[in-house]
Amino acid sequence: MNKALYKPLSWVVGALGGILAGQVFKQVWSRVAGEEDAPDATDRDYTWRQVIIAAAVQGAIFGAVKAATERAGAVGYRKATGDWPGDD
């Protein structure tokens, strides 16, 4: 199979990963903070600490989910084609 097929697959997997990461973050934030929505950087009702912690947690979750979905996509591609997408 052509490795060019991996690129569109990675876009789909990435988009699904973004959706999943958003849902995971919302659940984590709701359980940890007891609030439905995380604070925005411009929300004056929250402290610097609250805003920075929310952003750090969100970034960590998005990074982990992105890595997991990209890895799963690469493994799935290898199982389907026998090729690893990063190999030339």
Image (cartoon, rainbow, N blue to C red):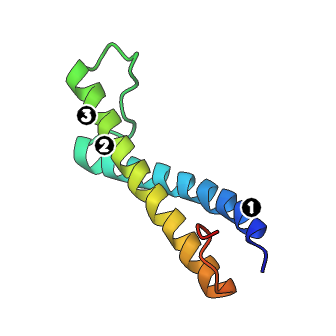
Circle number at residue 51: none
> Which label lies toward us, 3 or 1?
1
> Which label lies toward us, 1 or 2?
1
Q: Are marks 2 and 3 in contact (CB under 8 Å)?
A: yes
Q: Are marks 3 and 1 in contact (CB under 8 Å)?
A: no
Circle number at residue 57: 2
- Residue at 37%, 42% (x, y): give it: 58
- Residue at 68%, 57% (x, y): give it: 11
Which is nearer the N-term, disc 1 or disc 2?
A: 1
Counting other residues with Cα less than 10 Å from the Cα at mark 2, is it few (<14), some (14-19), or many (20 or more)? Answer: some
Q: Amino acid at mark 2?
A: Val
- Residue at 49%, 68% (x, y): give it: 71
In this view of the protein, can residue 47 be seen by the observer? Answer: no
Is 21 above or below relative to 53? below
Circle number at residue 53: 3
Answer with left or right where residue 73 lies relative to residue 2. left
Q: Secondary structure at mark 2?
A: helix
Q: Position of residue 87 (x, y in %)?
A: 60, 70
Q: CA distance from mark 1 to mark 2?
A: 29 Å
Q: Secondary structure at mark 1?
A: helix
Residue 59 lies in what quarter of the image? top left
Counting other residues with Cα less than 10 Å from the Cα at mark 1, is it few (<14), some (14-19), or many (20 or more)? Answer: few
Residue 48 lies in what quarter of the image? top left
Q: CA distance from mark 3 to mark 1?
A: 34 Å
Q: Position of residue 53 (x, y in %)?
A: 25, 34
Is 76 above or below relative to 24? below
Q: Amino acid at mark 3?
A: Ile
